[in-house]
Amino acid sequence: METEIKIGFNDNVESSVYLLLAARARGEKAFIDFNGHILHSDTVSMESAFQEVFNCTKEEYYQKVKEWETEREKRENARKQRAESMITQWIEKGKYLIYPEKYEDWERCVVLEANDSLYYGTTLDYSLEVMQALEDGKPLEEVINIYNNQGHSSGSAGTTQRIVFSFSKKGPEFIETLLNEELSPELKEKIEKQKQENKTLEQLHLNQSDGSKRHM
């Protein structure tokens, strides 16, 4: 009777073959279901297993892995280099969309996000697109559509929401409309506090502008 050997999450083709060869050495008939490919202890070999699962030899498989790793490293380096080259542009673009009192925090945010090895500043691209749309006075529903079409992961979505909320002059209103029924009492309180802060800053700069005009 042929028995099934269960494999773990970290088992690969090689380790599966060794388990089957060990069963054969003990005189046992066993099989392993490797992602739908059935490998049998009485017929398995390392090469036959790789042919069955990957449709190539073991050597060809690891060559493909090496090429994939090289390509992945190139893409990673390109993303990193782009982020480094974009820092000044991200900072300056953001300064046109936020209150001057937040410039220093914005600069720190940009440097932090640009050096995040998961996104390398993609979250800044997303955030600035939303912030620009809000600054242009586009309806919130339209801005939310822009946000929804950015292709977010759960991580980039959360980071983008945080950046827009913290820096955009209309960030609280955006988050309030975006999350709507998902708002917790704590977040509602935070939104109202941010609205008041933005209102205070807006009034401050209006007064400064009026004062400048009177002295002209």
Image: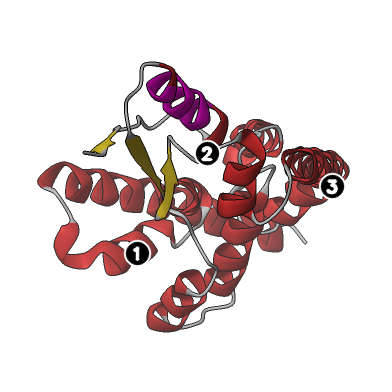
- Mark 3 Cα shell of 10 Å, populated few (<14), some (14-19), many (≥20): some
Could you say which is closer to the camera, residue 129 or residue 158?
Answer: 158
Answer with left or right where residue 117 lies relative to residue 15. right
* Residue bearing mark 3: 82
Q: Quadrant of the C terminus?
A: bottom right
Circle 3: residue type: Arg
SS class, disc 3: helix
Circle 2: residue type: Val
Could you say which is closer to the camera, residue 187 or residue 10?
Answer: 10
Answer with left or right where residue 205 lies relative to residue 84. left
Question: In whole angstroms, how far apart are the C-alphas of marks 3 and 1?
Answer: 32 Å
Instruction: Compare marks 3 and 1 and give the one earlier in the sequence.
Output: 3
Which stretch is magenta? 15-24
Instruction: Compare marks 3 and 2 and give the one earlier in the sequence.
Output: 2
Could you say which is closer to the camera, residue 197 or residue 163?
Answer: 163
Q: Is residue 83 above or below residue 172?
A: above
Could you say which is closer to the camera, residue 56 or residue 134?
Answer: 56
Question: In whole angstroms, how far apart are the C-alphas of marks 3 and 2?
Answer: 48 Å
* Residue bearing mark 2: 44
SS class, disc 2: loop
Label annotation for residue 173: 1
